[in-house]
Amino acid sequence: MKHAYDHYLSQTAKELQPSGIRKFFDLAATMEGVISLGVGEPDFITPWSIREATILSLEQGYTSYTANAGLLELREEITNYLATRFGVQYDPNNQIIVTIGASQAIDLAFRAILNQGDEVLIVEPAFVSYAPLVAIAGGKPIPVSTSAANGFKVTAEQIEAAITEKTKAILICSPNNPTGSMLTKDDLMELTTVINKHDLLVVSDEIYAELSYNGDFCSVAAMEGMYERTILINGFSKGFAMTGWRLGFLAAPKEIAACMLKIHQYTTMCAPIMLQRGALEALRNTYHEVESMRNSYRRRRNYMVQTLNQLGLECHTPGGAFYVFPSIRSTGLSSEQFAEELLVQEKVAVVPGHVFGESGEGYIRCSYATSMEQLQEAMRRIKHFIETRKKVLCPTAAQSTIQS
C-alpha cells in the first residue's frame, strides 16, 4: 500500500529547491572525460603535517567528546589567529565556537537571531545555501543584487533601499562566492555607516579570507562600531585545503555566542576531536603552505581572466577566492543553456550563474582550483564550443572567414 507522506512534511522543507550546483555535478559524474570547473574545492591535498597530527592524535587515543564549544586549546589558537591576521580580539572562553564547517556556523547564526518573518539582506550573486538557511530558521531572505559594472560589489545606497522595519541582519561574503569580488576597507566603511544607522546585525562569511590576492582583506568585525554587531564565520576548508574535514568556527559577541552554543549543544554536541587536533597544527605551522597555494591560485586566476576575455566572455578580475564569473551573454544562451550544452558537447562542467540569484543570469561560475593543464584544456574546449556555435548561427560569415 502506497503511503502519502505529503501531510507529514514541513511546508518549509517542501518549498526548498534542490541545489542548482548539485544538478551539474551529478550529470558530470555519469560522463567520462569531463573537466570540472564546478567544484568549489581546493585541488591541493591537505598539508601532510596536518594529516600527520590527526593520525598521531588517534594513535594517542584522542577519541572522546570535547567541550561543546571545542577544545579550549584550539579556541585559544583561533583567538590568536583572528587577532594576528585580522586585528579582531575575542575571548576563547565564551566567544568562539568550533563548528562542523562554516555552513553549520551560518545555520547556527540564523537560528539564534531570527524570529518568524525577520528579514535578512543577502548580497547576490550569493552561495546557494544562504537563502535556504534563512528560510529554515523562519526568516525571509531579501536579495540585494549587484552587477559586473560595479565589480559585483554592493553599495550603501542599495542596502539602504532594501531595508524595512523587519530587517534584522545582512549577510556579506567577502571574498565572494561565486564572483570572487572582495570588499576593501573603504567599501566596508560606506556599508557599515548604513548598517550602524539601522542597527543591523552582520553575518560575515569570511571563509575565503586567506585567498585574498592583493593583501587588502579586511574583516567586517574590525571596522568601527561593528565588533558588537558582527557574527564572524570562518573555517579551514578553503585556505588550508581541508574541505572534507568539515571544520569551521565562529566568533561573536558573548550574548549571541551563548545562544548559538545552546543550539550547537543540542544539535551537534561538538566537532570531532581528532580533526580539532589537526586544526591546531594547521594554525600553528602551515602558513607557508597556505601562501604557496594562494600564489598558485593567483597565477591560475590571471590565466583564466586573460583567456576568457580573449574568447569574448567578458570577465572581471576577482580579488579573492578561486572563482571567475564571466559573462556568456555574447553567446545568446541563458546560463543554464550554456552550461548544459558545454557539458554535453565539450565535456566541461561549469555552474550556471542563475543558481546564485537572479543577478547571476547571463554568467557562469568557473573554479580554477584545478591544475593548469586541466584549465588550459578546458579553455581550448570552451573556445571550440564558442567557435562551433558561431558557425551554426552564422554559417555564411563563418565560410567567408575561412575563404579569406
Image: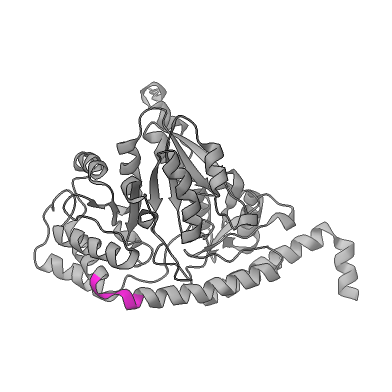
The residue at 52%/76% (across/down) is: 299
| Residue 287 lies in the magenta-colored region | yes
- Residue 296 at x, y = what percent? 46, 76
Foreground residue, 122 or 178? 122
Q: Quadrant of residue 144?
A: top right
Closer to the camera, 288 or 356?
Answer: 288
Magenta residues, dominant SS class: helix
Task: Residue 256: give x, y in percent of width and height.
Answer: 26, 42
Which image quarter: residue 166?
top left
Viewed as shown, does residue 29 lie left or right of 395? left
The reply to whether the magenta stretch includes residue 388 is no
Relative to residue 151, is residue 58 drawn left or right?
left
Where are the magenta residues, as a range?
Answer: 284-289
**Depth check: 11 or 255 in front?**
255
In the rendered image, which quarter contains the N terminus? Answer: top left
Q: Residue 200 at what x, y percent from top left?
A: 40, 40
Q: Is residue 188 above or below residue 132?
A: below
Residue at (26% x, 68% y) in the render: 283
Image quarter where the C terminus lies is bottom right
> Residue at position x 90%, y 69% from top?
400
The colouring scheme, among rainbow, by chain, secondary structure or one colour, is one colour
Asked if one can make out residue 127 in the rendered structure from this viewpoint, the answer is no
Estimate the x, y position of residue 242 in percent, counting from the top left.
Answer: 33, 64
Answer whether residue 121 is visible to the viewer in this image.
Answer: yes
